[in-house]
Amino acid sequence: MENEYTDNLKNKFDAIILEECTESYLKFTTEINDIDRFITFLLLADKFASIPKNFYEIRYFASEVLEDSKNNRFKELSDLVRSGKFDHWFSIYKYEKFLGQFLYARGVDNLIMYLKNILEEIVAKQSAILESSKIKNIAYGKTNDIKRGFEKIEVKLFLNEEDMMWFDEIVKKRNLIVHNRAIINKSFFEKFPNSKFRIGKELSFSYKDISEFYVKLTNFAAPLDSRLAQKFLLVLNNNHKIK
């Protein structure tokens, strides 16, 4: 997903790091970084919770939250939490499937919003170049609509068929998460028969999967941002400020 517009500066996770970028990309990468830090925070919290002394405090705090003197059911639940009956509640891995799906869909939405925002930047620079209605269509995330939107400004969004198939697949996975409880249906499997997921199975992503997926999102958007900034002489921002 790289090209001649990228200087190949990468971090230890193989993600492309742009020294300067458009305002649209700055919003995109800020969200990527925030979610990466959130995952790191979860992993640190899990290590903290695994220390016996801390775990006792967590049980006590959770039981205090649940306890209700006016409701015997919650009083019993509070006692069970304090006893350690529900210790599995306090592992981040109990919620990994749910959070993985949420963060995957959010990552796809972030990329789609970047594509919409960058077109808005270009239109603001050259107002006659694209109708606003074309930009609105991109927010719905249909691959061909997005591709045609960039064709209108004479930009090849996907540099090869592999990139286009990848993009189409992640958008359709996002749609399954949002509209079908992440369950693989027949139409998805027929379109992507080589997927590791099978009909009737639920999409699942580990925290590690999400971090690696966000690297792929970055490595798709970064070269594109460089191409568009150069082609349309867009205003660039320092991307190295710590936020």
Image (cartoon, rainbow, N blue to C red):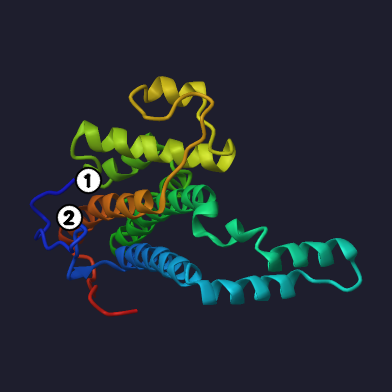
Q: Residue furthest bottom?
A: 242
Tell me where residue 105 appears, x and y as whole percent: 47, 48
Tell me where residue 155 appears, x and y as whole percent: 22, 45
Q: Which of marks 2 and 1 is nearer the N terminus?
A: 1
Image quadrant in which you'd find residue 57: bottom right
In the image, 84: left or right of 190? right
Quickly name the residue at label 2. 227
What's the amino acid at mark 2?
Arg
- Can residue 130 be seen here? no
Mark number, residue 48 = none
Q: Nearer the viewer, residue 79 or 168?
A: 79
In terms of secondary structure, where does tag 2 sit? helix
Tell me where residue 27 appears, x and y as whole percent: 37, 67
Q: Which residue occupies 46% across, 44% down? A: 137
Marker count (numbered): 2
Q: Residue furthest right?
A: 70
**Crowding near the residue tagged with mark 2, few <14, some 14–19, many ≥20 C-alpha atoms within 10 Å:** some
Q: How far apart are marks 2 and 1 (CA)?
A: 9 Å
Tell me where residue 115 appears, x and y as whole percent: 35, 52
Q: Which of 148 and 141 is in front in this view?
A: 141
Q: In this view, does 67 lie above or below 136?
A: below
Q: Looking at the image, is mark 2 or mark 1 nearer the viewer? A: 2
Q: Nearer the viewer, residue 106 or 59?
A: 59
What's the amino acid at mark 1?
Val
In the image, 5: left or right of 73? left
Mark number, residue 155 = 1
Q: Which residue occupies 30% across, 37% down? A: 166
In terms of secondary structure, where does tag 1 sit? loop
**Crowding near the residue tagged with mark 1, few <14, some 14–19, many ≥20 C-alpha atoms within 10 Å:** some
Contact (Cβ within 8 Å) of mark 2 with mark 1? yes
Q: Is residue 197 above or below residue 157?
A: above
Query: Where the N terminus falls, by quadrant?
Result: top left
